Image (cartoon, helix red, strand yellow):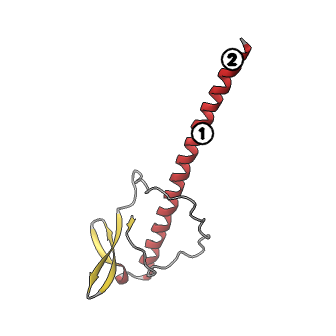
């Protein structure tokens, strides 16, 4: 799901833990195999008022025309996408650190072999 602009029209999920402070910019989530249908939102201008639209499987819907349950599900999808993006960023950082730890160990073992000979 890609959001271009969020508005306060959707409900917040009940019992959600407070968000972590944004210390780094998260990368865009990668679609997983068997992922949910693509969803996007956009604003369109009509009669000097802008409406938030959401596109699900190629069909656009005005968010204000959706019932509260549908709006809550949109909010849940957005929250899930945000967490997935944060976790993917954290995983990339951890994989990079692990690679560097391995390189540092190789360097230490080479020095140890040099000293033992």
Tell me the crowding category of disc 1: few under 14, some 14 to 19, or many 20 or more residues within 10 angstroms, Cα based. few
Q: Is residue 98 above or below residue 114?
A: below
Q: Nearer the viewer, residue 94 or 11?
A: 94
Tell me the residue at 72%/16% (across/down): 115
Q: Residue furthest right?
A: 116
Tell me the residue at 31%/70% (across/down): 55
Cα distance, mark 1 to mark 2? 23 Å
Tell me the residue at 37%/69% (across/down): 4
Q: Which residue position is annotated with label 2? A: 113
**Nearer the viewer's eye, disc 1 or disc 2?**
2
State the image quarter where residue 77 is shown: bottom left
Q: Earlier in the sequence, mark 1 or mark 2?
A: 1
Badges 1 and 2: C-beta atoms under 8 Å apart? no
Provide residue 14's location: percent of width, then percent of height: 57, 76
Q: Is residue 17 above or below residue 93?
A: below
Count numbered badges in the picture. 2
Query: In terms of secondary structure, where does tag 2 sit?
Result: helix
Tell me the crowding category of disc 2: few under 14, some 14 to 19, or many 20 or more residues within 10 angstroms, Cα based. few
Provide residue 68's location: percent of width, then percent of height: 44, 82
Tell me the residue at 46%/68% (across/down): 78
Q: Nearer the viewer, residue 48 or 95?
A: 48
Provide residue 110's location: percent of width, then percent of height: 65, 21
* Left or right position of 36 against 90: left
Q: Which residue position is annotated with label 1? A: 98
Query: Which quarter of the image is occupied by the N terminus?
Result: bottom left
Query: In terms of secondary structure, where does tag 1 sit?
Result: helix
Provide residue 31's location: percent of width, then percent of height: 40, 54
């Amino acid at each position: 799901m890609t959001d271009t602009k969020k508005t306060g029209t959707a409900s917040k999920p009940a019992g959600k833990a407070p968000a972590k402070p944004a210390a780094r910019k998260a990368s865009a989530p990668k679609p997983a195999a068997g992922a949910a249908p693509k969803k996007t939102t956009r604003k369109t201008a009509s009669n000097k008022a802008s409406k938030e639209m959401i596109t699900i499987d190629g069909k656009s819907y005005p968010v204000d025309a959706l019932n509260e349950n549908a709006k809550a599900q949109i909010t849940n999808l957005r929250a899930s996408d945000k967490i997935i993006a944060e976790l993917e960023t954290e995983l990339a950082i951890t994989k990079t650190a692990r690679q560097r730890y391995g390189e540092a160990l190789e360097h230490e073992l080479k020095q140890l072999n040099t000293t033992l000979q």
